[in-house]
């Protein structure tokens, strides 16, 4: 929080404003700021900045010949997927530091987007939790405060052990929730992440569709078979893509939220692994009130760009259920959003 107006930075009478306008060194060689510091060339040069990670709405760097830039042009919204950039941003920061460079991470205010990127780096390299990382940053830059969606993504980043991969169930479900939110806001989904067709997993073992995560049952040596079409026996959905919900309560089974009191998805997965571990989260296949399985959207489901539609068996075409990106109500009373629903009478579980 040093007063550094003599380094080319415009003077201002209020100290707090300086703290906000200046950049702060979070760990040696790694700085954080808003757009004003990042736009003050002499100031950056005085601190011997070599690399700039710009996370604003703007695609152009202000001083392209002066610094090595990495630009992530994303809005500061809960729905923005920042976690998918963490592997790249961590790499950019680490490689610059390893070369003896000095890195500035900045966004518009130096409060949300850049702080999220900074926290992700601290978590990965210093073994901090998301809240420890935020406290660490706030000690140097008090206005640091990522939006709720970004805080959830930092939490998720820790939960998936920094492995941002669709092979991670929690990450897949986060992406599905993001797709539903995008469809609701814009009426379309630009990039679909779908659960693998279990017949493809068993057949080819292709890297994009196989899962390296031991399913809960696999860890006990008794892998549960996939859900199958009752009529033709075709495998439909692997067990790890069956989604639990709390019977009789309105909620979003895909939502990755902890702090607002709704279901934390890793709890749901844990309940799949050990149905007896929780009193109020019930595995769908052990609850008689639920006449449907809710699953992740799977590759073979047709017409997923529509708001809603039928789910038919890819082999015998018998009607298995329905989907609706806005959600559907289970027979137990719970709304599940988005909903990809297979009637229990039509599938063997
Ligand atoms: Zn139900
Ligand atoms: Zn069938």
Image: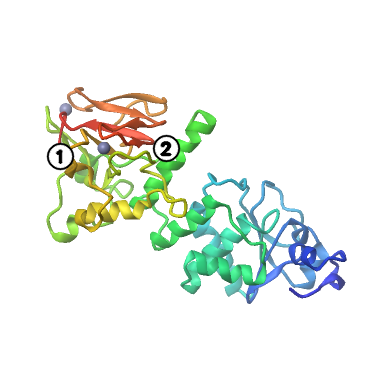
Q: Check disc 2: other Cα within 10 Å, few if <14, some if 14-19, many if 20+.
A: some
Give the percent coordinates (x, y) of residue 331.
Answer: 25, 31
Q: Secondary structure at mark 2?
A: loop
User: How far is the residue under mark 1 from the one under mark 2?
Assistant: 26 Å
Give the percent coordinates (x, y) of residue 267.
Answer: 32, 55
Q: Ligand 1 is found in which quarter of the picture? A: top left
Eyeballing the image, is 154 above or below 337?
below
Quadrant in which the N terminus is drawn: bottom right
Eyeballing the image, is 32 above or below 322?
below
Q: Quadrant of residue 29?
A: bottom right
Q: Residue 191: tell me if it is visible.
A: no
Q: Secondary structure at mark 1?
A: loop
Give the left or right position of residue 200, taking residue 48 as reference: left
Give the percent coordinates (x, y) of residue 287.
Answer: 19, 42
Q: Quadrant of residue 339?
A: top left
Quadrant in which the C terminus is drawn: top left
> Does the residue tagged 2 have its C-beta within 8 Å of any atom of ligand 2?
no
Identify the mark nearer the N-term, 1 or 2.
Answer: 2
Give the left or right position of residue 61, taking residue 219 as reference: right
Give the percent coordinates (x, y) of residue 301.
Answer: 30, 30
User: Viewer-proximal residue, 284 or 177?
Assistant: 284
Q: Quadrant of residue 101?
A: bottom right
> Does the residue tagged 1 have its C-beta within 8 Å of any atom of ligand 1?
no
Q: Check disc 1: other Cα within 10 Å, few if <14, some if 14-19, many if 20+.
A: some
| Residue with the mark numbered 1 | 349
Q: Which residue lies at the image location 30% right of the left edge and 44% below the top edge?
A: 246
The label on residue 192 is 2
């Amino acid at each position: 929080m040093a007063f550094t107006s003599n380094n080319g930075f415009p003077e201002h009478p209020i100290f707090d404003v300086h703290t906000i306008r200046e950049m702060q060194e979070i760990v040696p060689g790694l700085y954080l700021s808003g757009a004003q510091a990042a736009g003050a060339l002499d100031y950056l040069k005085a601190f011997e900045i070599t690399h700039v990670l710009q996370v604003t709405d703007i695609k152009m760097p202000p001083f392209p010949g002066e610094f090595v830039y990495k630009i992530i042009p994303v809005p500061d919204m809960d729905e923005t997927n920042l976690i998918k950039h963490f592997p790249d941003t961590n790499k950019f920061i680490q490689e610059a530091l390893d070369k003896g460079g000095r890195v500035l991470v900045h966004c518009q205010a130096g409060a949300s987007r850049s702080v999220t990127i900074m926290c992700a780096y601290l978590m990965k390299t210093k073994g901090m939790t998301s809240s420890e990382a935020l406290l660490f940053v706030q000690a140097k830059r008090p206005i640091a405060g990522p939006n709720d969606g970004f805080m959830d993504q930092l939490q998720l980043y820790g939960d998936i052990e920094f492995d941002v991969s669709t092979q991670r169930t929690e990450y897949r479900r986060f992406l599905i929730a993001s797709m539903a939110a995008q469809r609701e806001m814009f009426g379309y989904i630009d990039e679909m992440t779908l659960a693998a067709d279990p017949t493809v997993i068993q057949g080819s073992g292709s890297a994009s569709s196989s899962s390296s995560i031991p399913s809960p049952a696999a860890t006990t040596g008794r892998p549960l078979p996939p859900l199958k079409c009752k009529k033709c026996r075709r495998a439909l959905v692997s067990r790890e893509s069956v989604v639990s919900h709390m019977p009789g309560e309105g909620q979003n089974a895909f939502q990755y939220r902890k702090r607002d009191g709704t279901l934390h998805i890793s709890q749901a997965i844990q309940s799949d692994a050990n149905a007896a571990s929780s009193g109020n989260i019930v595995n769908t296949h052990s609850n008689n009130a639920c006449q449907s399985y809710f699953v992740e959207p799977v590759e073979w489901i047709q017409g997923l760009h529509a708001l809603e539609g039928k789910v038919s068996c890819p082999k015998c075409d018998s009607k298995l259920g329905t989907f609706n990106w806005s959600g559907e109500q289970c027979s137990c009373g719970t709304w599940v959003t988005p909903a990809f629903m297979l009637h229990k009478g039509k599938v063997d579980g």
